[in-house]
Amino acid sequence: MANIQDILFIFMQGFSGAVAGYITNKYAVNMIFKEYTPLKIGGAVKKNKVKFIEEISELVEKDIINSETLIGSIESKDFSDVIDSACVDFMTNSLNDVFNGVKLKNIPGISTSTAQCITFIEQNLQEELPKLIDNLSNKIDIKSLLQKEQLDNISEKIVGLIIEVLETDEKLEDFFSMFI
């Protein structure tokens, strides 16, 4: 059985080890960042500041924040939820607070702004809409937007239109008659 002297000895060893570790770590960390002026020892980071900044920046850019990690974060459900929440908060709370509950129809000149927006859209729609549709078609999986019944309905209508065109268009008959 341990006597009081053994317990006190173990406690003192632990305490002295903790004190020695604290002092060593404190000075080791200080030696990395601070330069002790009389002897100019320490301060490795201070002496190599530019190189240190470049290497840390490269490490962060290469291994921590790069295009893959950013794309992964942006495409995540959590990011989407945060953006949705921010938009809802902005539209329901922030705008209402800023405009003190004023409705759009009560803002002076809103009808002129609306007319200018419509004119802008009409002028740019033919040029920009194909780009928008092309971009959306590359990014959106239609199966995720429409149910099977809707896709079947759309397919039936497209097939019906193709058959209608094929039955009524004489140019197609002329084209196929070359092969028959």
Image (cartoon, rainbow, N blue to C red):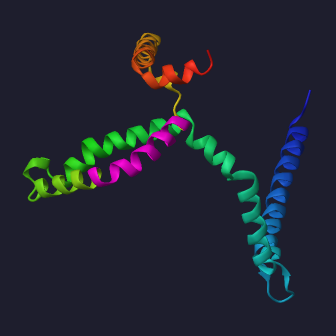
Please tell me how many numbered marks the rendered image carries.
0
Spot occupied by residue 2 in the image (x, y as percentages of width and height): 90, 31
Specify whether 16 is left or right of 33. Answer: right
Residue drawn 59% across the image and 22% down it: 178
Specify whether 171 is left or right of 28. Answer: left
Spot occupied by residue 77 in the image (x, y as percentages of width and height): 53, 33
Using the image, determine if residue 12 lies above or below residue 22.
above
Using the image, determine if residue 177 lies above or below residue 84.
above
Depth order, front residue of 3/161 = 161
The C terminus appears in which quarter of the rendering? top right
The N terminus appears in which quarter of the rendering? top right
Residue drawn 14% across the image and 51% down it: 100
Residue drawn 81% across the image and 71% down it: 32
Depth order, front residue of 34/129 = 129
Q: Quadrant of residue 139?
A: top right
Residue 101 at least partly seen = no
Specify whether 147 is left or right of 13. Answer: left
Residue 56 at least partly seen = yes
Using the image, determine if residue 132 lies above or below residue 117.
above
Dominant SS of magenta comes to helix
Spot occupied by residue 177 in the image (x, y as percentages of width and height): 56, 18
